[in-house]
Amino acid sequence: MLEEQIKAIINPKYPLITNLSNVSAVLNQLENINWCGFYLSSEDGLYLGPFQGEVACSFIPFDKGICGRSYREKKTIIIDNVLLEKDHIACSSISKSEIVTPIIKNNQVVALIDIDAPIYNRFNKSDAILLENIAHLLVDLF
Ligand code: SME
């Protein structure tokens, strides 16, 4: 179970990047995905964090992308068909659907978990619950 693996590998004494790097490798065990990783909030926007997959956008402004929408709305966003979303930033032409979940600490989004899939309609409510549980496990690292 991914949550159990994540609980086992994270160590709050280690640097954030160290922990998130291994968590991205755990997330990459999910089936039918082509990219998974983190965007980290900073004062001016969202910066790419540890990930697994192809080269991705290094920076996303708060008002752009599905990541920006999840940041602004402070909630999980599921996109069944990214090709129909004008907000979507295409880092890879392989991606067809996407889920983004915020990690929220003291009512601030400190990071986002972003997963892309090479098939349409990949993500559902149970994926949202899984990522929200994982976000909860990670919040104390920030
Ligand atoms: N698709 C995202 C950008 C990041 S990549 O998927 C890795 C978005 O629209 O915010």
Image (spheres, grey):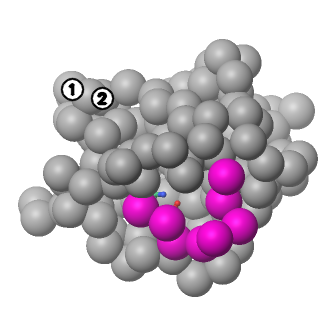
List the residue tagged with mark 2.
74
Q: Nearer the viewer, residue 120 or 60?
A: 120
N-terminal label among 2 and 1: 2
Q: Amino acid at mark 1?
A: Asn
| Residue ID at (49%, 58%) | 38
| Residue ID at (30%, 29%) | 74
**Is 93 one of the magenta-colored residues?**
yes
Q: Quadrant of residue 24?
A: bottom right
List the residue tagged with mark 1.
107
User: Where residue 8 sits in the image (x, y, percent)?
Assistant: 76, 43
User: How many neighbours does mark 1 have within 10 angstroms: few (below 14), some (14-19), or many (20 or more)?
Assistant: few
Q: Nearer the viewer, mark 2 or mark 1?
A: 2
Identify the main secondary structure in magenta. Answer: loop
When the figure is inspected, residue 122 is found, relative to residue 128, above or below; the finding is below
Q: Is residue 52 left or right of residue 58?
A: right
Q: Nearer the viewer, residue 78 or 142?
A: 78
User: Where residue 131 sits in the image (x, y, percent)?
Assistant: 61, 32
**Is 117 one of the magenta-colored residues?**
no
When the figure is inspected, residue 75 is found, relative to residue 21, above or below; the finding is above
| Residue ID at (73%, 42%) | 120
Q: Dot 1 lies on which element?
A: loop
In this view, the residue farthest toward the bottom is 55
Q: Amino acid at mark 2?
A: Lys
In this view, the residue farthest toward the left is 43
**Label number found at residue 79:** none
